[in-house]
Amino acid sequence: MSASPIAVVKNLWGGELPEFECLDAVNELIGVLVNGLWNSLTRHQRRSEPFRLVRPTVQESRVGLAGLALIRRQELDGFVEGLFNGAEVLDLPQKASASLDILGEMRALFAGIHEVASDAAKPAESSEIATTMKHLREMTRIADTEINRVVLDCTRARRQLMGTVGTAKPTRH
């Protein structure tokens, strides 16, 4: 239902914030991670500001292909890790669950592409690399769509649930 930005930041250091030399260092960390990153991510809960995966410039080469596939796999891993926030199981809305299944399949494809492209022993024609790069760009657009579907469906469900909490009138005796 809710996530504390400070709790998430603590998880970056194994559950405890690191020691700081001064209050300015604490304020800088909070400013960057919480006020900057956390708050900027919340804007994607609106349909008008969809989330987009990074669009790095990569060469159409075996190394570029492997690098892009690794980035995409890591982005999907990070999204799922952030969504679950340490939980083993989540009760997700139906559309979000279906989109998460698609993202899981895409993650496996990205991992496979990375593994094959990283293996110099495997043949790789430049035309095949170019075709696979084209497919990766299309998969990126699909991943963007599915991530946004998860975010919006979970946001909608949370708002609906929050609207029902506390709306029941107390029984008067």
Image (cartoon, rainbow, N blue to C red):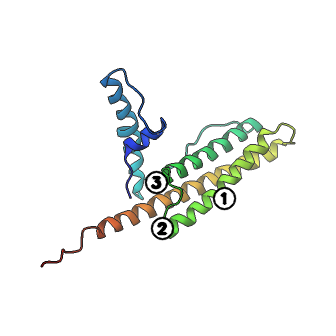
Q: Residues within 10 Å of mark 2 (few under 14, many from 20)?
A: some
Instruction: Say which of 82 and 124 sits in front.
Output: 82
Q: Residues within 10 Å of mark 3 (few under 14, many from 20)?
A: some
Q: Is residue 138 above or below residue 56?
A: below
Residue ID at (41%, 33%): 17
Determine whether the residue tagged by mark 1 lies in a helix, strand or loop. helix
Quadrant in which the C terminus is drawn: bottom left
Q: Is residue 161 above or below residue 69?
A: below
Instruction: Say which of 168 and 34 sits in front.
Output: 168
- The amino acid on which the numbered mark 3 sits, given as a three-letter code, is Pro
Residue situated furthest top in the rendering:
21
Image quadrant in which you'd find residue 142:
bottom right
Name the residue tied to disc 2: 93
Q: Is residue 109 above or below residue 12?
A: below
Q: Are marks 1 and 3 in contact (CB under 8 Å)?
A: no
Name the residue tied to disc 1: 105
The first of marks 3 and 2 along the sequence is 3
Residue ID at (51%, 70%): 94
Determine whether the residue tagged by mark 3 lies in a helix, strand or loop. loop
Q: CA distance from mark 2 to mark 1?
A: 19 Å
Q: CA distance from mark 1 to mark 3?
A: 21 Å
Instruction: Say which of 165 and 40 sits in front.
Output: 165
Q: Are marks 3 and 2 in contact (CB under 8 Å)?
A: no
Residue ID at (36%, 20%): 21
Q: Position of residue 67 (x, y in %)?
A: 68, 38
Name the residue tied to disc 3: 50
- The amino acid on which the numbered mark 1 sits, given as a three-letter code, is Glu
Depth-wise, is mark 1 or mark 3 nearer the camera? Answer: 1
